[in-house]
Image: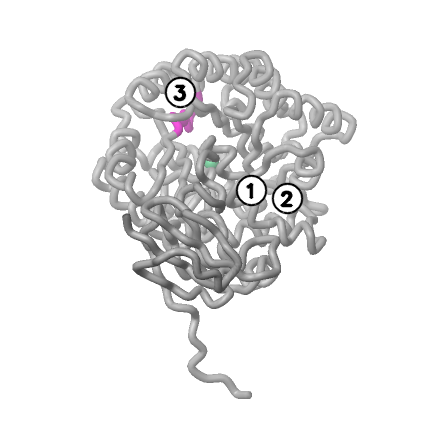
Amino acid sequence: MNTKIYKNAKLRHKQELYDIWVEGEKIKDIVPAGFRGFPAEEAKDLGGKLVCEPYVESHIHLDYVYTADIPAEETGTGTLFEAIEKWSDSKSVLTIQDIKDRAYKGIKAEMRNGVQYIRTHVDVTDPNLTALKAMLEVKEEVKDYLYLQLIAFPQEGYYAYKGGAQLVEEALKMGADVVGGIPHYEFTRQLGEQSVKKAFELAVKYDRLLDIHCDETDDPESRFVENIAAEAYDTGLGSRATASHTCAMSSYNNAYAFKMMNKFKRAGINFVSCPTENCYLQGRYDGYPRRRGITRIDQLVENGLNVSFAQDSISDPWYPLGNGNLIHQVDFGLHLGHMMSLEQIRNGLDFITINGAKTLSVTEGYELKKGNNASFIVLDAPDELTAIRERAHVLLSVRNGKNIVEKKPEQILKEPF
Ligand code: FE2
């Protein structure tokens, strides 16, 4: 079995340097640097660079990436609901190959930046399920390099789109891993609640995970997160259920928010925040002072709840920017969540590593430790604080003992002094 040593690695929350010994696809051991205990066929000196678990993209729409320019002319003011309408018009022209080509471009952007796990919402409000067919093919094709988890996501609703609920179920039968939803987009509060209930019924029936676009609005009356918590508690789905966005939580009154923290803990659900996209899309109907629509990240974390940060979009009708580099989301998320103690910054990478892995339920063998998968990334920084402050590049991505992405450090060719 092939043996390798990655020497002089700086591990998170440790002062000294370590050597990572890899045998085949597993970590044989992690020992203080310089220990000479095992033979190795290959050696790589990491020179004290920071090593951590691979990044986890816990919320993106790979079937939408690089569609911001379809149609070519600029329309509307760029609000979330306008984008849904615009997408509804655009998606019918896309073929399986179009979607695959764009998805690959997005996947490569993410993988170049250290991602090895992606949860992607796939729009199933399409009678032909074109995007799902495309993404099922991609999932199979990339599986040796990337774990891709597909959500049956009804972008236009379970009931606001005729036959939406049936299409979600059809997508699950075809192999989607996760049940999605968008209750705040249904016509009424009652239909939104019904859609959450239906999503949980499907998750139980087909033994799948669940991740719902939830309360992605500034409307403080949008409270579908309580339905998700209640259903996760009642069905026992617990940590297999996730509430994405929960932007309205930043507009809830404190008494209600604090009551719900306890319910969330009992339910055990995960939260995903998309810092750059949410702060752009929310607050659009405000004058000043203007809300930024970021969920209560700090309070959720203080209450021991699992929160991950995600990209959401790369250049689509919702958000024209985005580049798949998740450390940008950590930088934004810490700013927008008012989380700037040194300890909070040092823990910042958790939002795109271990917390994301929990959301995707892929924790087995994930952590960087003896006996686990030999999958990790090397950042161009000596420690966590520098990595986040400088939004450090990923120099190396190792998956199951193989170097799958390698990059040179940034080189300065000239400077004045
Ligand atoms: Fe989304």
Q: Provide the secondary structure element on which disc 3 rests.
A: loop
Residue at (45% x, 51% y) in the render:
322
Vertical position of residue 366 compared to residue 231: above or below: below
Residue at (28% x, 21% y) in the render:
174
| Residue 278 tag number | 1
- Across and down, in percent, residue 230 comes to 61, 16
Q: Provide the secondary structure element on which disc 2 rests.
A: loop
Query: Which of disc 2 and disc 1 is earlier in sequence?
Result: 1
| Residue 178 tag number | none
Instruction: Check disc 3: other Cα within 10 Å, few if <14, some if 14-19, many if 20+.
Output: some
Q: Which residue is mark 3?
A: 161
Q: Provide the secondary structure element on which disc 1 rests.
A: helix
Instruction: Check disc 1: other Cα within 10 Å, few if <14, some if 14-19, many if 20+.
Output: many
Mark 1 and ligand 1: say if the CB distance to the nearest ligand atom is below 8 Å. no
- Across and down, in percent, residue 302 comes to 71, 38
Disc 2 marks a residue whose amino acid type is Arg
Query: Which of disc 1 and disc 3 is earlier in sequence?
Result: 3
Could you tell me how far apart the alpha carbons at marks 1 and 2 are, in whole angstroms? 7 Å
The segment highlighted magenta reads: 151-157
